[in-house]
Amino acid sequence: MTGNCLVRFSGVSYTYPGAAAPAIADIDLEIASGEWMAVLGCNGSGKSTLAKHLNALLVPAQGDCFVDELNTRSEDGKRSARRAVSMVFQNPENQIIAAVVEEDVAFGPENLGLPPEEIRERVRWALDVSGLGEMARKPVYALSGGQKQRLAVAGAIAQKPPCLVLDEATTMLDPRGRQDLMEVLSTLHSDGMTLVSITHRLEEILRCDRCIVLSKGRISWSGTPRELFLLGEELDRWGLEIPGMVKVWRELVKKGLLKAEIPPRMGEMVEALCR
């Protein structure tokens, strides 16, 4: 295991009690420190099961998962994984604890036993990064769905974890809410945080460094977003839908009007199409 590797899966399989087949099987995977990785797949492909192994909510039935060089099968490994990896789930309501925005963000740092001044500093930083700095004293019920999801992110990052995992965190958001959340994630990634985005929305992976595709609990493909968008029938077989802008791009490539290499950012696509 290299020093730059934050998470390593070695032959990891997991079967839920009573299930006929494993949810994930024979997963070999490394996630580098500072990397933004997307885990893609249709419903039932094993994405959430894989995500829950990252911070030891689940422990492998077979194989081993190492987080920050510790095996999550051990008690020390579980504790280390839960400090190193914070998770944001699909429904922010399930993660919001307090009635006031800043009190909710402070919940995690308080449970780490940090000094009051450090807690206040972490709350200010997390709210500013999440774009909620002016809403610190607002009641949570006054927030929109997108703001609540950013509050869930703020609560997760206030614990200063090396890695943040988002399990379908944009599913319940409207397009503006998704865009706002993606901007927050881009800021965190620029600051060196490791990100793992669990999603089936391919438009969300343009900013990622790498993506893997899960199908029937196994890794079917691994590569960059650019390489993924150049695939053909495989995407349909995996139940993944190409973003509209990429479909336009591919049609123009077929007509010889644009080069085959797809830009990594949606804004770059728009600029190229306008040219």
Image: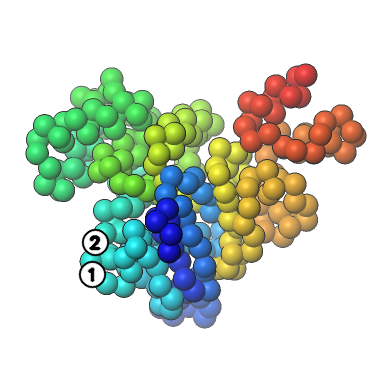
Badge 2 amino acid: Arg
Q: Residue at x 66, y 27 (%)?
A: 268
The residue pinned by badge 1 equals 75
Q: Is residue 140 above or below residue 90?
A: above
Picture quadrant where residue 259 is located: top right
Residue kind at label 1, given as amino acid type: Glu
Which residue is at 87% across, 38% downward? 254
In space, the residues marked 1 and 2 are separated at their CA atoms by 6 Å
Determine which residue is flagged by label 2. Answer: 79
Horizontal relation, residue 112 to residue 257: left or right: left
Residue 164 can be seen in this image: yes
Q: Is residue 65 above or below residue 242?
A: below
Contact (Cβ within 8 Å) of mark 1 with mark 2: yes
Instruction: Describe residue 74's horizontal placement relative to residue 231 as left or right.
Output: left
- Helix or strand or loop: what does disc 1 sit on? helix
Q: From where the camera sits, is residue 48 visible?
A: no
Q: Secondary structure at mark 2?
A: helix
Q: Residues within 10 Å of mark 1 (few under 14, many from 20)?
A: few
User: Residue 267 in the image: x percent, y percent?
Assistant: 63, 26
Circle on res. 93: none
Pick the residue in front: 267 or 32.
32
